[in-house]
Image (spheres, coloured by chain):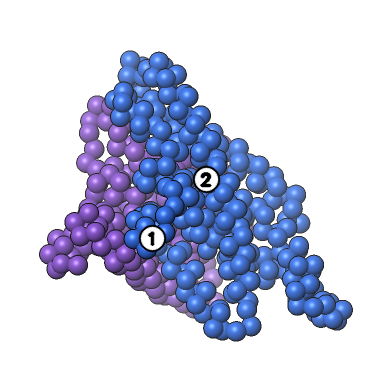
């Protein structure tokens, strides 16, 4: 494909730059908060999968399967349009962060689950032999070993989450894509703004995935 | 909710979602096999180009890609795309990049001795791929591909942002018309869940079928089981001192 040079306007790119940086900041903010929610809620799901009572395990299993198998976009609209009907008001950014965090928590739950299952049975037996209380078995023996194994996999989901942050543009959050759309709507120059945003994602995602691969080699022995 | 809205928007919406999934899955499969096989090619340049494709399309957001294809590409190349095809192109190209990694992984997982056996039978690289590697790799690909298809099905919800009348767009319109947000969004989530469930079930049936077929035959007959009788005849006819076939 030949990109015609006369259709590319560097002036439009430099006009877009201040908005671009605002968008990057918002995107990183969504990513940080979303990761925090998905990592912590995911751990809760993962522990609930192993709960002694099946009245905990079954509902949690059904809820996570449902969230995992339905589109994030529709969940986002659900939270954004339905919660206010029930008199729960959040800003678009908060709604977006909750939606993305909750959606990815069902993925991170599976990661934690695999990590917990990968801890050798002997470790459980050792904890029992030392008559450690249930809570200490988790916090002092199992989780420190499990989490070390799952960090690279969690990182992969952070990158996946990064690529889903543009969905929040649809409810009006001023992240990268929405900044580009607003700029393009004013200047009618979609080419520059959208291309800059597309490239920005690759520029952030590719080094991150290289970093994760290096981390994986170090952590997973 | 009024019956008219259901008939006019939701049912056609389901059909459009299914169509989008089928078309994008078809494109993604073609891309996945093309790029995935290229990533195991013996020429470094081919491997590099295929790797470059994978990194580019896995690195960017499919929504940004979809907008880029819909808004920017027409300006650059001078022809317009129907929203539906822009969406299929974006979904197919980006999920194809994920699929390519699955194809590459499964091809690399085939025992090296199988590849060597192909060389020993003086198969050409293409024959080795077609007769030895792919038949063994494909059953391994089915479970991860089934996950990828569910992701693709969920990914089709993005197209509502281009105004294509799929399930999520139908939900959006019904919400505007009736202000019954809770009902319509719950219904659309359930629709996606049921579609994903059916898809997973279908893929699992396919998996059982392929695994059963391969397992049964390989136990008794090894490599030859992968070949049809016609291909067996070809193998039988290969001259003993034949070339390398490369």
Image quadrant of residue B178?
bottom left
Residue B138 in percent (x, y) is at: 46, 62
Residue A217 shown left or right of residue B20 in the figure: right
* Residue B119 visible: no
Q: Residue at x 48, y 24 (%)?
A: A18
Residue B238 in percent (x, y) is at: 47, 57
Most distant residue in the left direction: B4
How far apart marks 2 and 1 lie (CA) works out to 24 Å
Residue B37 shown left or right of residue A158 in the figure: left
Host chain of mark 2: A
Q: Residue at x 60, y 37 (%)?
A: A207
User: Dot 1 surroundings within 10 Å: few (below 14), some, or many (20 or more)?
Assistant: few
Image quadrant of residue A186?
top left
User: Dot 2 surroundings within 10 Å: few (below 14), some, or many (20 or more)?
Assistant: many
Drawn colour of chain A? blue
Which chain has been coloured purple in this picture?
A: B
Q: Nearer the viewer, residue B210 or B171?
A: B171
Badge number at residue A87? 1
Q: Nearer the viewer, residue B246 or B34?
A: B34
Question: On the image, numbered disc 2 is attached to which residue?
Answer: A30
């Amino acid at each position: 494909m030949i990109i015609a040079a006369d259709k590319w306007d560097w002036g439009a790119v430099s006009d877009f730059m201040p908005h671009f940086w605002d968008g990057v900041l918002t995107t990183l903010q969504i990513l940080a908060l979303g990761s925090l929610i998905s990592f912590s809620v995911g751990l809760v799901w993962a522990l609930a999968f192993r709960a002694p009572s099946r009245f905990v395990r079954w509902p949690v299993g059904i809820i996570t399967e449902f969230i995992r198998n339905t589109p994030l976009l529709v969940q986002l609209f659900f939270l954004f349009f339905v919660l206010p009907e029930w008199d729960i008001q959040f800003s678009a950014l908060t709604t977006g962060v909750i939606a993305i965090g909750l959606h990815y928590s069902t993925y991170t739950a599976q990661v934690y689950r695999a990590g917990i299952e990968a801890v050798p049975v002997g470790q459980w037996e050792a904890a029992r032999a030392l008559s450690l209380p249930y809570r200490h078995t988790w916090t002092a023996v199992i989780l420190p070993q499990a989490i070390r194994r799952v960090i690279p996999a969690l990182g992969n989901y952070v990158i996946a989450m990064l690529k889903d942050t543009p969905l929040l543009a649809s409810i009006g959050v001023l992240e990268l894509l929405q900044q580009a759309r607003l700029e393009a709507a004013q200047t009618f120059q979609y080419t520059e703004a959208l291309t800059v945003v597309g490239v920005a994602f690759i520029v952030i995602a590719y080094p991150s995935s290289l970093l994760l691969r290096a981390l994986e080699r170090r952590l997973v022995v | 909710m009024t019956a008219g809205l259901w008939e006019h928007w939701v049912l056609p919406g389901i059909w459009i979602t299914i169509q989008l999934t089928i078309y994008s899955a078809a494109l993604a499969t073609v891309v996945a096999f093309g790029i995935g096989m290229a990533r195991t090619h013996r020429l470094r340049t081919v491997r590099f180009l295929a790797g470059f494709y994978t990194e580019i399309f896995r690195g960017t957001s499919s929504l940004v890609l979809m907008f880029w294809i819909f808004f920017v590409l027409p300006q650059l190349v001078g022809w317009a795309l129907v929203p539906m095809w822009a969406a299929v192109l974006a979904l197919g190209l980006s999920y194809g990049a994920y699929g390519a990694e699955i194809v590459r992984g499964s091809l690399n997982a085939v025992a090296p001795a199988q590849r060597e056996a192909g060389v020993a039978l003086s198969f050409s690289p293409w024959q080795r791929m077609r007769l030895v590697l792919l038949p063994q790799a494909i059953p391994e690909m089915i479970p991860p591909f089934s996950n990828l298809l569910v992701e693709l099905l969920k990914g089709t919800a993005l197209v509502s942002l281009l105004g294509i009348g799929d399930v999520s767009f139908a939900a959006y319109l019904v919400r505007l018309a009736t202000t019954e947000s809770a009902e319509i969004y719950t219904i659309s989530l359930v629709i996606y869940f049921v579609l994903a469930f059916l898809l997973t079930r279908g893929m699992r049936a396919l998996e059982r079928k392929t695994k059963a077929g391969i397992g049964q035959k390989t136990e008794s007959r090894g490599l030859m089981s992968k070949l049809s009788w016609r291909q067996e005849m070809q193998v039988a006819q290969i001259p003993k001192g034949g070339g390398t076939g490369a």
